[in-house]
Amino acid sequence: MLKVGLTGGIASGKSHVLSILEELGCEVLDADDLAHAAIAPGEPAYSDIVESFGKGVLAPDGTINRASLGRIVFADSDARARLNAIVHPRVFEAQKRWFDELTRRPNDGPSIIAVVDAALMIETGSYRGYDCVVVVHCLSEIQLVRLMSRNKLTREEALKRIESQMPSAEKLKYADYEIDTSGTFDETRIQVENLYKKLKERK
């Protein structure tokens, strides 16, 4: 099995790249989905977050209001570190279980290309556990406009979220491969198809 780490800044186009890789035949996992599951009511991380941040982060239905929590952690690096310390260990455990399940597949286990999309892979050091790292990036103004549109944020709010993460130029220093999503969907797809060919050659 080839373990591929996919990362990049917020709103850089990682999910789109991941969806194309899945379509081409890769097994894919979005760490965001694992993080959402980890903070669901009844999960240990849920009670840890409520204890750490208070009931003000809860939605009327008792779930964690991710928008409210986001406003807190993107404005305060210490709060962001507290949240990451709660959520990341649970995400890493779930990722390991996923890899273990893929490994146990009869016959096709060794031929699998397994791709994990995780925004903070480099920051946490977890990129070291992959056979190669793909960094997705785009022009900074395009990233800003995408984030404002997707999350319904003001320019100032979007900038604050982007600036809370490692710059793309720094992430690219860790890249074995890169995908630039600044262009059209077709241009991005061509890059991803070429990447898939290269990944298959590594098998």
Image (spheres, grey):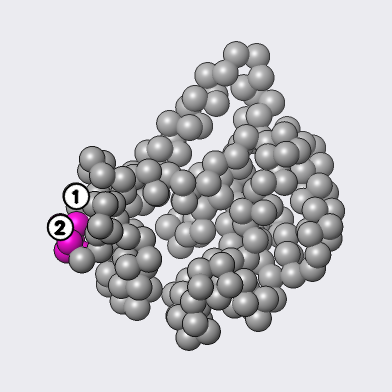
- The N terminus sits in image quarter: top right
Image mark for residue 128: none
Residue 203 visible in the snapshot: yes
User: Is residue 110 found inside the magenta-colored segment of the image?
Assistant: no
Query: In the rendered image, which residue does mark 2 sit on?
Result: 51
Report the side of 19 relative to 151 (left or right).
right
Q: What residue type is labelled 1?
A: Ser
Looking at the rendered structure, the number of numbered marks drawn on it comes to 2
- Residue in the foreground of this view, choosing between 190 and 106: 190
Where residue 191 appears, x then y in whole percent? 80, 55
- Residue in the foreground of this view, choosing between 31 and 55: 55
- Identified at 79% across, 59% down, the residue is 185
Which residue ends up furthest to the top in the rendered image? 106
* Magenta portion: prevailing SS class: helix
Image vertical order of residue 122 relative to residue 36, above or below: below
Query: In the rendered image, which residue does mark 1 sit on?
Result: 47
Residue 166 visible in the snapshot: no
- Identified at 67% across, 46% down, the residue is 19
Image vertical order of residue 32 relative to residue 112, above or below: below
User: Is residue 53 found inside the magenta-colored segment of the image?
Assistant: yes
Q: Which amino acid does label 2 sit on?
A: Glu
Q: What element carries label 2?
A: helix
Report the side of 77 relative to 114 (left or right).
left
Q: What element carries label 1?
A: helix
Where residue 164 appears, x then y in whole percent? 44, 75
Residues in magenta, as a range = 50-55
Q: How crowded is mark 2: few (under 14 residues within 10 Å), some or many (20 or more)?
A: few
